[in-house]
Image (tube, coloured by chain):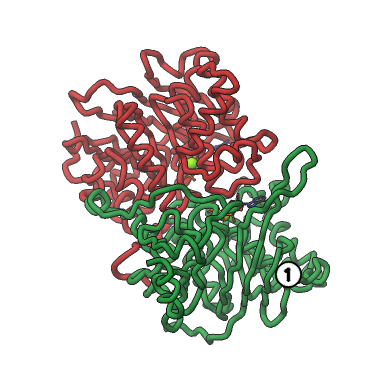
Amino acid sequence: MPDGALQPGSADPVLDVRGLKTVFKVRGGEVHAVNNVSFDLRAGELLGVVGESGSGKSVTMMSLLGLLPSPPADVRGGSVRFEGQDLLHITPEQLRAVRGGRIGFVFQDPMTSLNPVFTVGYQIMEPLRAHMGLNKNAARARAQELLELVGIPGAAQRLDDYPHQFSGGMRQRVMIAIALACDPKVLIADEPTTALDVTIQAQIIELMKELRDKLGMAVIWITHDLGVIAGIADRVLVMYGGQVVEHAPVQELFRNPQHPYTRALLTTIPKISGERARRLTVIQGQPPILGDAPTACPFRDRCDVAIARCATENPPRYDLGGGHDAACFVAKGAVDA
Amino acid sequence: MLDQTNTALVRVRDLQMHFPIYSGLLRRQTGAVKAVDSVSFDVMQGETLGLVGESGCGKSTCGRAILRLYDITGGEVTIDGTDIGQMSQSDLRTKRPTMQMVFQDPQASLNPRMTVEAIIREPLDEHTKLSAAEKEAKVGELMDAVGLNRRFAKRYPHAFSGGQRQRIGIARALALNPKFIVCDEPIAALDVSIQAQVVNLLEDLQEKYGLTYLFISHDLSMVRHIATRIAVMYLGKIVELAPRAELYSDPLHPYTKALLSAVPEPDPAIAQTRERIVLQGDVPSPANPPKGCNFCTRCPAVMPVCKDIEPTYQEVTPGRFVACHLFETTGTAEKTAGYI
Ligand SMILES: Nc1ncnc2c1ncn2[C@@H]1O[C@H](COP(=O)(O)OP(=O)(O)OP(=O)(O)O)[C@@H](O)[C@H]1O
Ligand SMILES: Nc1ncnc2c1ncn2[C@@H]1O[C@H](COP(=O)(O)OP(=O)(O)OP(=O)(O)O)[C@@H](O)[C@H]1O
Ligand SMILES: [Mg+2]
Ligand SMILES: [Mg+2]
């Protein structure tokens, strides 16, 4: 049955995604990139999203912001409630007003998402003028403030530089500055700190926490860095093969992972202290192909605890109590309703 | 354990790479970004030297300068006995095969209109006189070496996952049997399991072909896994260089200490209680570095001398180099005396 059990009694979410489905039409068939994904986000909360490359993390977020070109993308179903409207059923103008304003976002690839022919300053000032109606001088002052906030030295001068004059990590911080420009209610950040070293990353994380506390900004943070997740997330979604396979409060997820993919993921991380592994662990096998809507567990071929049923039925998200759910028949406490 | 012969394959001395800044109506040069400013180190035969440091500190520039992808501002770069620091780009062509680079972004560095086979063959076309059949055989071997199915040879890059694309880049870098490869953040864009696959592959290839790597990364846990020795950069300079075990168990430079304390721990119980050294203050601009030590504006252990005199980069115990007044063995007393 449709998954995505919400905890009973939770405060009204700022963003509520139900049964999202996105399919790409490709030559000779389809790619079912997002299959029935449900989650919610509460004010001032940081939701971490982890999962294998190709598991649908980016496509999920792009779908709910209406950022995928159609064709080839087809958002086939579901709803995305934000401030009393369904983002999947509003006009493109209404959606544009939300995007970059009330919902800020940072794309995965900062190298290609900044425009090389405009100065960095222009690109930060653009949303300030469009969404907040600031005049040129006010926008420039705010842009400088934002660059300082994300830790770019010599911000005043660097506003006039072009993206190629910035290092990889600096471009990523510019993207974060743009996303934060209009004091968003929700920030969706797709791998926002992958190109950043740890001290700047720590600084960005502190900044996010501060904005969350001060402005009640809620954050969705996609990353493959489980260290970052451990440090900042309140709750975590684990994605695999276009689906949410596990969802739990952060401590619980690390202490008591119930989906075999989550367990495998947690054993692949190299450590900064303690015994140094001679060879890194990898998850054997290939990711699923996603050619059809799933009729079986997408992880079964790589799973060491699979049972017969995993090949004939796609497990629903079983509520395991305490805000923890997992899409696995053999999860401890998984009981069919 | 390590069969490292202790001879330097790459010798870098006082390397400088400055980018001019032009301003005003006449676009006159008014200054320079000192992206790499007097950096010296060796990369030993068969080792992996890790290069870490803050975003914008000059790691990529350093890697590119060593391979002479830039005309360097000053200093010496010797690779396998030849000084290539001032060599002309045409003379460099003959040296190119020995030194290669794996770029950070596999997506941007592979030509989308070329098949995988053509991408891997390109350096062979350019630098060798092999026959078409020999090239085809070599491409097949390279694909095997990096674990890409030969059946995919005619496909285009977009049909591959991030990890597979990174392997295409590695296969191409290996085509001319290089001795030295600069890996610039080769795994940053990949998920943990694929990161592990690529790192395991780099280690296997190193063992098999005796490769030497400069491994640029901001992932200190991964660097701890792969590197034999590690150089830490800050604002265009190397502040510390040490063997792996020593660097992680006993960092000397205050910047290295701060860096290690900021590494996220993949354990929420530790992560939310751990003491972090949070650096105060802004990173100075490399166009206008502070007087004295480059780190003096943010250093938790700053002394008066640090704001005046640049510390010397020196070997403090065998194999450990550091540039910090706390560890200066000669002349520190006199220098400090002047300020007390
Ligand atoms: N334009 C497209 N056409 C066809 N398939 C696509 C397209 N864009 C994405 N996909 C597929 O959708 C799936 C989900 O991709 P997505 O980018 O969301 O992965 P991800 O979880 O963000 O991975 P990563 O960690 O590598 O960023 C993948 O299998 C991908 O190949
Ligand atoms: N072509 C260029 N023109 C002017 N300045 C440049 C140029 N390339 C790099 N820089 C500057 O040189 C400095 C070092 O850049 P570099 O790309 O080497 O940093 P990095 O250590 O690789 O950083 P990251 O970890 O963010 O990739 C930065 O201040 C950058 O802005
Ligand atoms: Mg993605
Ligand atoms: Mg770089």
Which quarter of the rendering shows the C terminus of chain B? bottom left
- The residue lying at 49 percent from left, 62 percent from top is B308
Q: Position of residue A300 (x, y in %)?
A: 35, 48
Q: Position of residue B32 (x, y in %)?
A: 67, 53
Q: Amino acid at mark 1?
A: Arg
Q: Position of residue A168 (x, y in %)?
A: 56, 48
Mark 1 C-beta to ligand 2 under 8 Å: no
Q: Nearer the viewer, residue A111 or B82?
A: B82
Chain to which mark 1 belongs: B
- The residue lying at 32 percent from left, 27 percent from top is A216
Which quarter of the rendering shows the N terminus of chain B? bottom left
- The residue lying at 30 percent from left, 47 percent from top is A231
Q: Is residue A297 left or right of residue A154?
A: left
Callout 1 crowding tier (Cα within 10 Å): few <14, some 14–19, many ≥20: some
Q: Is residue B92 left or right of residue B326?
A: right
Residue A333: quarter of image: top left
Q: In terms of secondary structure, where does tag 1 sit?
A: helix
Q: Is residue B165 visible?
A: no
Colour that chain B carries in the picture:
green
Q: Position of residue B256 (x, y in %)?
A: 40, 63
Colour that chain A carries in the picture:
red
Q: Is residue B97 visible?
A: yes
Q: Nearer the viewer, residue B131 or B215?
A: B215
Residue for badge 1: B96
Residue B130: quarter of image: bottom right
> Is A18 situated above or below B206?
above
How many badges with numbers are in the image? 1
Q: Nearer the viewer, residue A116 or A92?
A: A116
> Is A288 situated above or below A278?
above
